[in-house]
Image (cartoon, rainbow, N blue to C red):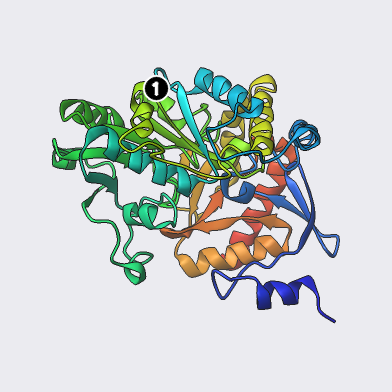
Amino acid sequence: MITPRHIFLQHLAQTSDSPLALEIVKAEGSTMTDVNGKTYIDLISGIGVSNIGHRHPAVVEAVKKQVDEYMHLMVYGEYVQSPQVMLARRLADVFPASIDCTYFVNSGAEAIEGAMKLAKRHTGRTELVSFRNAYHGSTHGALSLMGDEFFKQAFRPLLPDIRHLNYNDTAALKEITERTAAVIIEPVQGEAGAVVPNEGFLKALRKRCNATDTLLIFDEIQTGFGRTGTFFACEHDNVVPDIIVVAKGMGGGMPIGAFAAPRNIMASLMENPVLGHITTFGGHPVNCAAALACLDVLLTEQLITGVAEREQLIRTQLTHPAISAIRGRGLLLAVLLPDAAFAREVIKRCVEKGVVTDWFLFCDNALRIAPPLNIRMYELEQACAVIQNAISEVAGN
C-alpha cells in the first residue's frame, strides 16, 4: 500500500537523509497532532512562523473571506488590491520611524534579494557587508551573504564583492567604507544560536553607516513580529535601519515576506530601469489578508507583552547541570548543551515524548526554543519538564 510517507520519501525532493518525517494531520494553537493521534507541543513554531499559533481563528476567517472575493489578479504593483494597500498602511505604523513604503514578496530569501538590489540601485555602489554565522536565506544572492562556508562551497561562484565581518566586533566596522552599498545584519543572530548584540554594537554600526553613507539593512525575518519581546528586535537597541526585511511570523502561517524603506529610497526601483524589481505572486491578496489579521491579533491580544514572562519561565525551569547557558531574547532562545551528539539525542527523546524542538544551522549543540508567543503557560511548563527529563536521561542522571 502506498502511503503519504512513501510518497514523501520517493517523490518529494528531500533536503537531508534524516528528516523528522512527522505526518501531521491537525495543528491548533501550540499543538500538532499526527496521523496516529499523538499530540506534540510545538516549541519551534515552524521555525519562527506561527507567532500567533497554528490556525488562529482570525487568520482562518480572513483567508476564507478573501478567497470568496478574489485571489491572484495581476503581477505585483499593477492593480489596486485592498489587502495589499491596507497591510502596507498598517505596517507603516509599526515599522521603525521613517520606513513607510513596503514591497511585498513571497518569502524571506526573496525579500533579502530585493533589499540587496535596492541598496545597489540606490547607492550606485557594489560592495555588500554581512557577518559570519549569518543566515539570510538559500537563494543565490542570500547564500552569498551567508557567513558559513560549509553551506556555500558547493555552489560557488557566488556573488562578488561581499565582505564578511565578525558579529559584535566593533573594531571591524572600520572595514565599512564609501564603496559599501549596504550592511545587512540580524539584530539577533538566529542560526548562530540566538546570539544577542553586545551593548552599543548596533549603535556603533549605525554611526559607521552614517559616516560612510552606507545603507543599514536589518534582517528581521526571524526576529520580527514580537519574537524577541518587542515588535522588532532593533527596538531593544533603539537603532533605526534604512531598510527592514520581514517574513516568517508576518503571515500567521501563510507565505509572505517584504522589504521596506523610506519612499525616496524605494523609488529607486521605478526607473533606470523601469520595473527594477518584479514578482508575479508577491503581495498575494490571500496572504496579505492573513498578514493583516495576524498583525491585528498581535496588537489587539497584546501577545508581545507576555513574551518576557514566558522567557523567564523557560530560564527558570531549564536548570540542568548539562546546560551551559541559555542564550537569546524573548522567545528566540538557544539552550546550549555539551555537544552536537548530546543535543540531537535530546531532540530525539523530546519528539518521542511529544515536544518538538530543533537545533541551529551554525550551533548544532543547542536546542531551539521558539514557541508561539501565545503558548499557554501550562503547555510551556510541560514542555520544559520534558526537556529537563530528556537531558537527564541523556546525561545519565
Q: Position of residue 367 (x, y in %)?
A: 53, 55
Report whether residue 397 is seen: no
Q: Is residue 65 visible?
A: yes
Q: Which residue is mark 1?
A: 263
- Residue 190 location, x and y as percent? 45, 47
254 and 268: which one is in front?
Answer: 268
Mark 1: which secondary structure? helix
Instruction: Establish if 118 lies above or below 344.
Output: above
Q: Relative to residue 113, is residue 367 drawn left or right? A: right
Q: Identify which residue, 185 or 392, lies in the foreground.
A: 185
The amino acid type, in three-letter code, at marker 1 is: Arg
Residue 251, quarter of picture: top right
Q: Is residue 176 left or right of residue 325?
A: left
97 to 60, vertically: above or below: above
Quadrant where the N terminus lies? Answer: bottom right
- Tell me what residue is drawn at x 50 percent, y 55 percent: 321
Residue visible at 63% across and 47% down in the picture: 45
1 to 231, vertically: above or below? below
